[in-house]
Image (cartoon, helix red, strand yellow):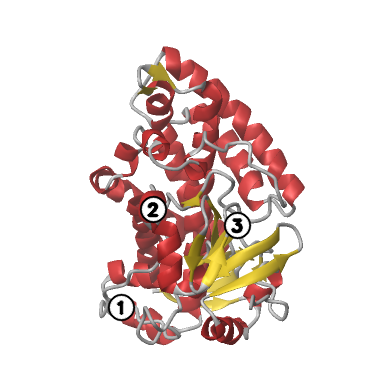
Amino acid sequence: MLTTTTAVDLTDPALWARPDTPELVDALRREAPVHLTDTADDGPVWSVLTYRESAEVLRNAAAFSSESGSLLGAGEGNVPVGSGRMMALTDPPRHRELRAPANPFFSKSGVKGAARSIAERAGELFDRAVEQGETDLVDVVSALPLAVMCDLLDVPEEDRDMVVRVCDVAFLGRTPEERRAGHQQLIPYLLHQVMLRRSDPRDDLISMMATYRVKGRLLPVEDVVLNLDNIVVGGVQTVRHTAAMGLHTLVHRPDLWQGLQRGEVSMDTAVDELLRWTSVGLHTLRTASRDIELGGRRIRRGDRVAVWVWSANRDPEAFDRPEEILLDRSPNKHLALGLGAHYCIGAPLAKAELSALYTAALERAARIEPAGPVTYNRSIINFGLDHFPVRITPR
């Protein structure tokens, strides 16, 4: 017998801001690892709630493909424009080919070399925030990944204000229409830069992507632009939302804040636990490429399967006391940055940025207190805060 999540609509963005969401999701997970959800926009979708089955889907690219879409919301039967052309929308071996030119910029060694400048930038952001006294923490933390991305792309100094402004609209716009308008300005700029650097390459991510050859052929310009746009979106959104939600957690848990300030917990383990706890990338979508059994359900070829990362990261079968925030949790095999072939290419950079932001806040603020109500965004793609007004007391 199929189970339909009629009582709990996982695709409703408002669900994820409710205080009783953990109990609702826990009840669903206990009932069955996989449910059939009849969504309003995407039709019937298999919802995977347990860690074991989620890991199985994410690891098995041969049975669960990304090429028909990696996120809900495109609409039933719609295939994204970048299918087979973007990293997020390709399967191995093509996926590996598209990642290859970007890998050096996001490797642990590459990020280690940039760690000092990332820490300095984060410090400057919180210096200004402390001086202001009252500020919106979403704005504070959003500035760091935008600046780091400009460095990776080697955006000319004279263009940076414009690029940051366009990205602000693309990522922080109040409506989907505003965000779409931002991307419509960003993409032509990226296209222009790709054409310039194909003829005059430098030592930067755009040049590497623009001049990279697969089997002797340059990647099509459109594919380069699509992948760059995807990298910018992923790199900015993940850090922005995780940092804001992580600080929101610490602000409301002074014991955790003080423990970190006293150095009782490694920042590395704290970052991983806050990634697990916030799980801002709520879900990942796949499409079954063959008939297969999953969690006792018969999945048919062409069926769409949504891994609910937030739920998997709170599965008591995989995590001890998952309902608690244990900043020293180790090991911590969370799925917040993916798993398998599609493990987040920017994971080392994202962790370095999060570490820098949390460290800067802890070093400069004795405490941070809410100065008004938070505003949650309405997204099941990158769930987080649009506004987090705070009052900062300097150390």
Q: In the image shown, does 220 or 158 lie closer to the viewer?
A: 220
Residue 43 at what x, y percent from top left?
Answer: 72, 59
- Residue at point 64%, 75% (across, down): 2
Q: Quadrant of residue 27?
A: bottom right
The secondary structure type at the circle numbered 2 is: loop
User: Can you give x and y, in whole percent of width and height, for residue 33 in the image?
Assistant: 51, 76
Amino acid identity at mark 3 = Arg
Query: Quarter of the image holding residue 23?
Result: bottom right
**Mark 1 is on which residue type?**
Arg
Which is more N-terminal, label 3 or label 2?
Answer: 3
Name which residue lies at 38% across and 63% down. 360
Q: Is residue 38 left or right of residue 119?
A: right
Residue 333 visible, this orientation? yes
Tag 1 secondary structure: loop
At 38% from the left edge and 47% from the top edge, which residue is drawn? 345
Q: Is residue 105 above or below residue 73?
A: above
- Where is the C terminus found, in terms of image quarters? bottom left
Q: Is residue 325 left or right of residue 374?
A: left
Quarter occupied by the N terminus:
bottom right
Which is in the foreground here, disc 1 or disc 3?
Answer: 3
Q: Position of residue 173 (x, y in %)?
A: 69, 50
Indicate whether 115 appears above or below 187. below
Q: Secondary structure at mark 3?
A: strand
> Which residue lies at the image location 49% right of the left edge and 56% below the top edge?
238
Q: Is residue 47 above or below residue 232?
A: below
Mark pair 1, 3: CA separation: 33 Å
Residue 40's tag is none
Question: Against 68, is 354 above or below?
Answer: below
Q: CA distance from mark 2 to mark 3?
A: 20 Å
* Residue identified by numbered label 3: 304
- Which mark, by number, is residue 343? 2
